[in-house]
Amino acid sequence: MANFTLKQLRYFEALARHGHFGRAADVCAISQPALSMQIKELEEQLGTDLFERGARQVRLTNFGEAFAIRVRDILRSVDELGDLARASHNQPVGRLRIGIIPTVAPYLLPSIIGNLSRIYDGLDIHVRETLTSKLVEELEEGRLDTAIVALPVSEPSLTEIPLFAENFVLVRPSEDEGKPVPNREALREMRLLLLEEGHCFRDQALSFCNIQSAVPRELMDGSSLSTLVQMVSAGIGVTLIPEMAVAVETRSASVSTVRFQSPQPSRTIGMIWRKTSPLARQLIQISEVVRDAADAMREQHDSIWRARDLEFDAHLKLPAISRDGR
């Protein structure tokens, strides 16, 4: 009977996931020779190769692929034993592995981390920022406890908790300030800048404009909301961004932002976690902290829009006075 260790299984899973000894060693916080030795010992105990070694990468053998499935199940079960212990407490304690999508992370994450650290003393927060598809995969594999994403995700194995709704705003060059707000039909005729494939925000923007996912010639892709806004500032086109991103992304760009007429494009942000997670009660508490942070941000944004509308209304009155010669 093979006498391999839990540590060896974690090293194996890291190498299977990254396909590279150097990257896997970095993730495991050990040297590359030490990782290689542990993998070699594991293969000797099993009596067969787990990996095909190439010059630049390694890949699983057929046996290694079957072994990886069992190993991930084992590691997930081991992690859930720790979750059971944490679930025995009345509030979140210990490690919290939370994922978040890139179109939310830079704007809401500082408030979330600050509030969680203040409310739950000793909570060890680990953050993972990536696309929804990757977050769902890592959640189902047990590498995350929860994730903040745009809903719906519609995965039967996951619980979804809606937290707040958020509108999109139009970003256009500063010289367009005061022009009529285009409707979705007019947007289809404009050069629309969008996030690259894989971002759910891209799909939501396309859906609002009623544009098929096959990208027409007049659409252009960017890797981040910051890139899109700077492209608009350079006069390349227009874009849509979530309202929470306006203050951060437009402060150093020569652009104009405006809300759409009703019905406004919007998205629902929520939290997801495994239905089998022992931490469900604690995650519900955490979701309330996230909701409170979003509510505070929305109130701040609404006050900014109100002040801006008052300033714009006052500006509109000036031409009428001058036409009367007064």
Image (cartoon, helix red, strand yellow):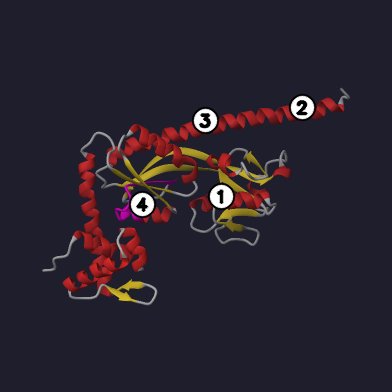
Query: Mark 1 or mark 4: which comes first in sequence?
Result: 4
* Residue holding disc 2: 317
Indicate the amino acid at tag 2.
Lys
Alpha-carbon span between mark 2 and mark 3: 28 Å
The foreground one among 322 and 31 is: 31
**Callout 4, which amino acid?**
Glu
Q: Which mark is residue 155?
A: 4
| Amino acid marked by disc 3 | Glu
Do residues under tags 2 and 4 come within 8 Å of each other at their CB atoms?
A: no
Q: Which residues are magenta?
A: 138-151
Of callouts 2 and 1, which one flags the residue occurring earlier in the amino acid sequence?
1
Q: Is residue 29 rendered to the left or right of residue 107?
A: left
Residue ranking furthest to the right = 325
Which mark, residue 225? 1
**136 sits left or right of 215 in the view:** left
Q: Under tag 4, what secondary structure?
A: loop
Count neighbours of disc 2 (C-alpha within 10 A) and say few if under 14, some if 14 to 19, many if 20 or more: few
x then y, percent, for residue 24: 33, 63
Q: Is residue 44 magenta?
A: no
**Nearest to N terminus: mark 4 or mark 3:** 4
- Residue beneath label 3, please? 299
Count of numbered labels shown in the rendering: 4
**How far is the residue under mark 3 from the one under mark 1?**
22 Å
Residue 111 image offset from top left, x and y in percent: 44, 37
Q: Please report the residue visible at 50 percent of the width from the left and 34 percent of the height from the top.
A: 297
